[in-house]
Image (tube, rainbow, N blue to C red):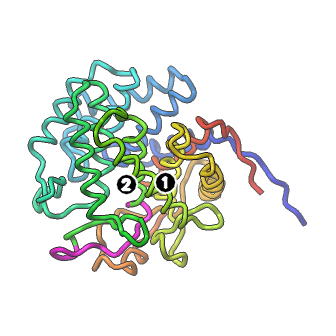
Amino acid sequence: MKIASHKIDCLKIAESVMDKHLASHPLNHYAGILSLHGLIRLAQIKKSAKFAKAAKELLRPFYSGEVKSVGGVYSKMYCCGGNASAWLAQVGYAPEILAVLVSHADELMSSHPRDKHGIFGTLKAPEKIWIDSAFAVCPFLVFTGNMTGEKKYYDEACLQMLEMDKLLRNKKTGLYQQSLNFAGPGKLSEDHWSRGNGWGALALAEMIAEMPKAHPKYAAIKKTYLELMEAIVRYQDEKGMWHQEMSEKESYVETSGTGLMLYAIGRGLETGILPQTYTESFLKGIKGCASYIAVDGSVFNTCTGCLCPGDGSKAAYMEKAHKMNDEHAFGPMVLAFGQAALLGIKTIELD
């Protein structure tokens, strides 16, 4: 017996996932900042003053100085709302907060510990670097550059992204390995972790969409983005998903990395930087993700917090637990399904 197909509304999915985040987790975490970035984009897509007001009110405790601590190495920068606050200001919803953003960007650039290549490292061990920081700092700096017109912010974002790319991207697979020096001096983690590749993909997608084409490093960023997108789609499974260890299909389907990579593909399609041939991968991924989202906005199969587990081997990453409604689950889906709607994919039909 054939089961009737049904249509789902991409914007409604994004909204329900955002509501689930607000109901189940606090926002003072980088995962909350990611979801708020998605909420601002929903406000733009829907042309909704209500959503814009909600985003501004939710971010107000960050940029007003009420939030004193946010989990993660970039706590001082995240305290202002990071990428979400910078995007809120850039799109004109809160231009008055620019001075706060500039202050945090300048403090990051002048004070945060760096490794010998100039890459931001951990606070106590600057030589320990990881691809997650691409998401944390690169879009924030580019958005700040767009608002100030100051080249130094683009320069810093490009230095961080391109140097990390040199050290962390596997030449054979074209994918990112998450970390260097966490598993031992000079040792790369052996993974091709889904969310880690998603962090790198998001950073590159925002940079290539937003930074000036006249910048001397624009061509290098574009080349890096296109190479990563080409590598990523090679590892997409037949249902449109990516797995916890992307090169090992026996590892579990992982939704947060999938959502981030879909958003990165969607941004490339939006700007025309990616050819339309990527639309098939994007649509297949959106359909695949829908089967991991419940009616109430709950999201399944998200890897819990993960930084070079165990010995940093593929097996150690594959053993890392997944759970429903982990704090990392929501933002990637808000961004991906919002991007689908922006691209004109208002509804999708599921079998």
Q: Position of residue 347 (x, y in %)?
A: 70, 41
**For residue 215, side relative to residue 261 (left or right):** left
User: What's drawn in magenta, residue-wise?
Assistant: 183-196
Q: Residue at x 52, y 49 (%)?
A: 265
Q: Earlier in the sequence, mark 2 or mark 1?
A: 2
Q: Residue at x 34, y 25 (%)?
A: 89
Q: How many numbered marks does the figure carry?
A: 2
The quadrant of the rendering that contains the C terminus is bottom right
Q: Is residue 295 above or below residue 165?
A: above
Q: Which residue is mark 2?
A: 200
**Is residue 184 magenta-colored?**
yes
For disc 1, the neighbor class at 10 Å (few under 14, some 14 to 19, many from 20) is many
Q: Secondary structure at mark 1?
A: helix
**Amino acid type shown at disc 1:** Met
Q: Position of residue 140 (x, y in %)?
A: 29, 38
For disc 2, the neighbor class at 10 Å (few under 14, some 14 to 19, many from 20) is many
Q: Quadrant of residue 308?
A: bottom left
Q: Position of residue 144 (x, y in %)?
A: 27, 31
**For residue 8, side relative to residue 169 (left or right):** right
Q: Residue at x 34, y 76 (%)?
A: 190
**Amino acid type shown at disc 2:** Gly
Q: Which mark is residue 29?
A: none
Q: Position of residue 338 (x, y in %)?
A: 55, 39
> Which one is in front, 241 or 168?
168
> Which one is in front, 326 or 313?
313
Q: Which residue is mark 1?
A: 261
